[in-house]
Structure formats: structure tokens, C-alpha cells
Image (cartoon, rainbow, N blue to C red):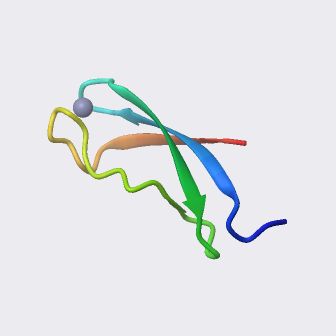
Amino acid sequence: MLKNQRAKITIQCNICGEKFTLRGRRAPGGQVDTGFKQCLCDNDTQFHITEEE
Ligand SMILES: [Zn+2]
């Protein structure tokens, strides 16, 4: 297993339903940093996040 494994992340906004597909880097703790900040609708907390291998 590589430590800096790339992950593909799908983020769906729970407010407006917009979907974003991002590539992130997995941190040692298992969290994936995508740099994603907020949706087009200004929502920055309500998301459904799916990780794809
Ligand atoms: Zn949204």
C-alpha cells in the first residue's frame, strides 16, 4: 500500500443535489483531502461523500 494513495471522491450536495467528482490524496489517518470547500449553492457542510477505488 502506498501512503500517498490517490483516491477518487464523489461529493453530492444534500441541498441542491449537484455532484462533484474530485481526486484527492489520502492522508495517513484515512481522511481524503480534496481541497473541496463548498458547493455552488454556498452549502459547505451538508454533503454525501462517496469514495471510489
Ligand atoms: Zn449545492
Ligand 1 positioned in quadrant: top left
Where in the figure is residue 26, as x and y percent of width and height? 61, 63
Q: Is residue 41 left or right of residue 13?
A: left
Camera-nearest residue between 51 and 21: 21
Q: Quadrant of the N terminus?
A: bottom right
User: Residue 4 occupies which quadrant of the picture?
Assistant: bottom right
Q: Residue at x 25, y 38 (%)?
A: 39
Say if 5 sits above or below 40 in the image. below
Q: Which residue: 35% across, 50% down?
A: 36
Q: Residue furthest bottom?
A: 28
Return the x and y of residue 45 as percentages of the image width and height.
Answer: 27, 50
Q: Is residue 4 left or right of residue 9?
A: right
Looking at the rendering, which quadrant does residue 42 occupy? top left
Q: Residue furthest top?
A: 17
Which quadrant does the C terminus fall into? top right
Please give the name of the residue rendered at 65% of the width and 54% of the height, measured from the top-left corner: 6
**9 w.r.t. 4: above or below:** above
